[in-house]
Amino acid sequence: MMAIIGMFFQDGLTGSAWGDWALYTGSPLRAFETELGVQDPVGFWDPVGFTADGSTANFARRRQTELKHGRVSMLATMGYITPEITGKLPGYLSPSAGLKFADIPNGLGAISKVPAAGWAQIVAYGAFCELSQDQSAGTAAAAGDFGFKVLTSSDPAEKQKKLAAEIANGRLAMMAIIGMFFQDGLTGSAWGDWALYTDSPLRAYENELGVQAPVGFWDPAGYCVDGSAADFTRRRVTEIKHGRVAMWACMGYIVPEYFKWPGFLSPTAGIKFTDVPNGLGALSKVPAYGWVQMIAFAGALDTGFFVYDESREPGDYANGGVLGVPNASGPMEDKDARKTKLNAELANGRLAMMAIIGMFFQDGLTGSAWGDWALYTGSPLR
């Protein structure tokens, strides 16, 4: 079915059942396949569909603009790089203002240092370059040829190759100069170290627990973009609690598969521990008083024992809380070892949160805590 539809298209668009796609000249995109800038491996690339109307005038105008942007970007990129490597020109940029070339910082910092008369000269020179030649449609200038023959050759193929390379380099330079602007603007230096970019609210949490390789500080939903330390701390406390509960829950799923307590869970109801199925099936077997005890126990832990002390790190309840719960293992003097262990706890807690949710799904859909997925017959797809 796929093949015959493909054959119909190929036949209808190329005029032959085994037609060469080079014969398909009806597409407006084909009009520009032999132009400069159509290069491997992409070929003619127009993801936004600017040339879908097939207008050669619009194409020529955009190509002329692209050439200008590329050339300016190549000069700008070199303007960023050269002063960093070769140094700056000697003497004065503005003798009347007593301003030397050496006084001008490299990159965006120069914007505030160049005198107003300097900006006027820059704008005037740009206007002269733009207006001094006829660039109307059909002229050589419209195709980027301004008579300044840096790239030329007596061999048409070689000249075409050089001009295509210029467009490719200009495209690369447009990307490069924008990257340099961002790096300069965000780090304060044309070759700035990203460690200097301290204004991002995300940077406030890079040294916190849980920031681990290979992901680093990971906040795909953008919860921390407001930079609120209080909100971050509250979420981290919640994450640690969830992780600890999830680790207990995972162990609670695993251990009863190998061992259950002897005797009665509820003597009055005559329910033994061995009568309670492992996993979600236990929900319907535990007596109401059992649920009350669980809720009361969890409430006591959260309100009486493990009360968060803002003077401590998230998750550190040692000697804290209303009842003064002691740190059974004693204080850990080695801060690096302590951080490593606490990071490991967070990582294990995150893994356990994923694991327990997986166990719930497996249990709920197969009817067993360690159920075989072949038992999942409730799906309409089965």
Image (cartoon, rainbow, N blue to C red):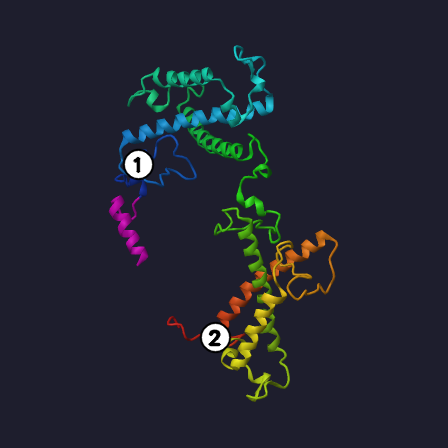
Q: Is residue 323 left or right of 176 when viewed as pictured?
A: right
Q: Nearer the viewer, mark 1 or mark 2?
A: 2
Q: 250 or 291: which is nearer to us? A: 291
Magenta stretch bounds = 1-19
The residue labelled by disc 2 is: 366
The residue labelled by disc 1 is: 51
Look at 41% across and 27% down and name the residue there. Answer: 69
Residue 161 visible somewhere in the drawing: no
Say what amino acid the circle numbered 2 marks.
Answer: Thr
Secondary structure category for the residue under label 2: helix
Residue 312: image location, x then y, percent: 65, 55
Say what amino acid the circle numbered 1 marks.
Answer: Thr
Residue 136: image location, x then y, percent: 29, 21
Look at 34% across and 35% down and name the residue there. Answer: 33
Look at 47% across and 52% down and name the residue there. Answer: 221
Residue 196: image location, x then y, percent: 59, 37
**Label 1 vs label 2: CA separation?**
55 Å
